[in-house]
């Protein structure tokens, strides 16, 4: 919504466009339900059991995200999630997907350093075949920012 407001080039004292105002009112009305969501922060992990990390990433024209779950012998825990708003300068979906993959790689690296035990396995998942093919090729293309 803030990007849409920025793109509308509205001045400080201008009225907010009706479509953005409607979305904002809907968001504030629904945000009261966020207090009912509870995510346990404590993860009791048996030091003798193997742990497996599963990370997922995805992107859209508006944002990209990454999430990591920890699977132990008996339980699955949400460890961490990160999101980023897509840049105002439009990027293609494959480029946003690679941004999501990078976000996931950084997130999994931080989590692996924070864990007291080394994971038995680590899986990183994306639904983008383009990203998978880019990751398998040698870096011939110029990087983007």
Image (cartoon, rainbow, N blue to C red):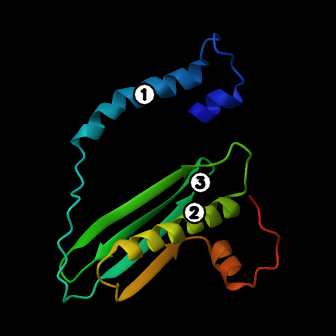
Residue 71 screen position, x and y as percent: 28, 77
Element assignment for label 2: helix
The residue at 76%/62% (across/down) is 144
Query: Residue 128 occupies which quadrant of the picture?
Result: bottom right
Residue 106 screen position, x and y as percent: 52, 68
The residue at 34%/70% (across/down) is 69
Residue 19 screen position, x and y as percent: 58, 24
Mark 1–mark 3 distance (CA, rounded to whole Å): 21 Å
Task: Tell whether label 3 touches label 2 (CB within 8 Å).
Answer: no
In the image, which disc is placed on residue 79?
none
In the image, which disc is placed on residue 100?
2
In the image, residue 125 above or below residue 81: below
- Residue occupied by mark 1: 26
Nearest to the observer: residue 50 or residue 28 = 50
Of pointers 2 and 3, the one earlier in the residue sequence: 3
Left or right: 30 with respect to 73? right
Picture quarter with the C terminus: bottom right
Q: Residues within 10 Å of mark 2 (few under 14, many from 20)?
A: many
In the image, residue 144 above or below residue 108: above
């Amino acid at each position: 919504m803030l990007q849409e407001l920025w793109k509308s080039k509205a001045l400080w004292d201008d009225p907010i466009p009706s479509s953005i105002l409607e979305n904002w009112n809907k968001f504030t009305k629904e945000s009261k339900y966020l207090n009912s969501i509870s995510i346990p922060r404590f993860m009791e992990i048996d030091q003798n059991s193997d742990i497996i990390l599963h990370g997922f990433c995805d992107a859209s024209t508006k944002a990209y995200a990454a999430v990591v779950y920890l699977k132990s012998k008996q339980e699955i825990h949400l460890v961490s999630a990160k999101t980023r708003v897509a840049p105002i300068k439009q990027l293609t979906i494959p480029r946003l997907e690679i941004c999501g993959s990078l976000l996931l790689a950084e997130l999994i690296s931080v989590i692996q350093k924070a864990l007291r035990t080394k994971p038995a396995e680590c899986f990183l998942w994306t639904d983008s075949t383009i990203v998978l093919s880019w990751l398998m090729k040698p870096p011939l293309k110029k990087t983007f920012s």
